[in-house]
Structure formats: C-alpha cells, structure tokens
Image: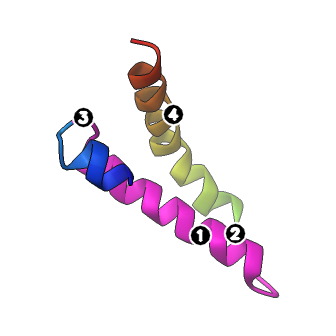
Amino acid sequence: MLGMHFVRTGKFPIPLSKFYTDLFDNRQIGDYEDFIYFDEETTSALYPQALELVETIERMLFK
C-alpha cells in the first residue's frame, strides 16, 4: 500500500521505501527465526536512515 499510494504518486521517496522494506524484512526475521543476532555496529549504521524515515513520515502527517 505504501508503494501504490505514496511512492508511485511521488509523495514518498523511493530510497526510503526500499529502506522501509528492508527494516520490515529484518523485523520479520527477528520475530520468527529461532536465533538471530543484530549487532550494535549494524543497527547503529541503520539509525540515520531510520531517523530520516521517521522525519519524512512526520512531515507528511503534520503538514
């Protein structure tokens, strides 16, 4: 739905959409795999993009 209603219409950036998909996939792995480890280095590297994602969504919601 994100892609159809926001990415295709140009309201949401494609790179952030791909990043969101990656985060969602990692979340699914973390929830349903028996043993998964996300180290601090990996998760710290995701933080700047995650912050950009949240800020973009907030701008869309509160404009």
Q: Residue 54 — which label?
A: 4
Q: Amino acid at mark 2?
A: Phe
Q: In this view of the protein, can residue 4 be seen by the observer?
A: yes
Say which element carries label 1: helix
Q: Residue at x 41, y 56 (%)?
A: 19
Q: In this view of the protein, can residue 37 be seen by the observer?
A: no
N-terminal-most mark, 2 or 1:
1
Q: Quadrant of the C terminus?
A: top left
Q: Quadrant of the N terminus?
A: bottom left
The Cα–Cα distance between marks 4 and 2, rounded to whole angstroms, is 21 Å
| 33 with respect to 10 (left or right) | right
Say which element carries label 2: loop
Q: Are marks 4 and 2 in contact (CB under 8 Å)?
A: no
Name the outermost residue toward the bottom: 34
Per the image, the residue denoted by label 1 is 26
Say which element carries label 3: loop
Per the image, the residue denoted by label 3 is 11
Magenta-tinted stretch: 11-37
The Cα–Cα distance between marks 2 and 3, rounded to whole angstroms, is 31 Å
The Cα–Cα distance between marks 1 and 4, rounded to whole angstroms, is 17 Å
The Cα–Cα distance between marks 1 and 3, rounded to whole angstroms, is 25 Å
N-terminal-most mark, 4 or 2:
2
Per the image, the residue denoted by label 2 is 38
49, 57: nearer the viewer? 57
The Cα–Cα distance between marks 2 and 1, rounded to whole angstroms, is 9 Å
Task: Check the image and report above or below for 22 versus 13.
Answer: below
